[in-house]
Image (cartoon, helix red, strand yellow):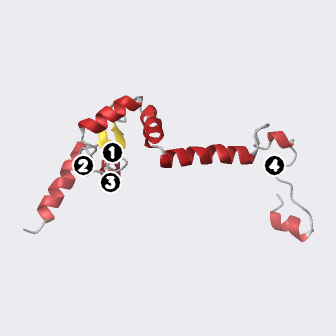
Amino acid sequence: MTTRRDWAKRGLHRPSSDEDKPARKRGRKPGRSALARFLRDDRRRVRRALEPDYRDGERARRYGLSLADYRALEKRQGNACAICRKVTRVLCIDHCHVTGRVRGLLCRRCNSALGFYADDQRLLRAALAYLQATTRR
């Protein structure tokens, strides 16, 4: 097998595996330019940043909720995290990974904490016991 260095010493260009394929088969979709894809994605980013209904509706649909369901859940919790009760601008939708059922809305920190413990109640209790045992009084 020849290496890239061997090809370079001879002044040759080592062909890549894509070069023998036609241009339309090299990972490019025909009919859609890179600029059009960028602009489409950019419009979505701007709408997510500026329109809370768009952002929240898009997030809610991912978990099978309508925007009205999401708003009702938000109102029931008082726009606060279900665990720490802090009011934040954006709340994460917490769901059971086994059943897919939505449990509530959490701030990013509380949602990450549950994720790090893989929703294991035994580990959470052990962490609580550790904190209680090592806290100075």
Callout 2 amino acid = Leu
Residue 124, compared with residue 29, is above or below; it is: below
Badge 4 or badge 3: first in the primary sequence: 4
Callout 3 amino acid = Arg
Which label is found at residue 123? 2
Pointer 3 residue: 109
Q: Nearer the viewer, residue 30 or 121?
A: 30
Pointer 4 residue: 17
Callout 1 amino acid = Ala
| C-alpha gap between disc 4 and disc 3 | 45 Å
| C-alpha gap between disc 4 and disc 1 | 41 Å
**Within-10-Å neighbours for mark 1: few <14, some 14–19, many 20+:** few
Callout 4 amino acid = Ser
Could you say whether the residue bearing mark 1 is in a helix, strand or loop?
A: loop
Residue at position x 71%, y 44% in the image = 36
Q: Quadrant of the N terminus?
A: bottom right
Could you say whether the residue bearing mark 4 is in a helix, strand or loop?
A: loop
Pointer 1 residue: 118
| C-alpha gap between disc 3 and disc 2 | 17 Å
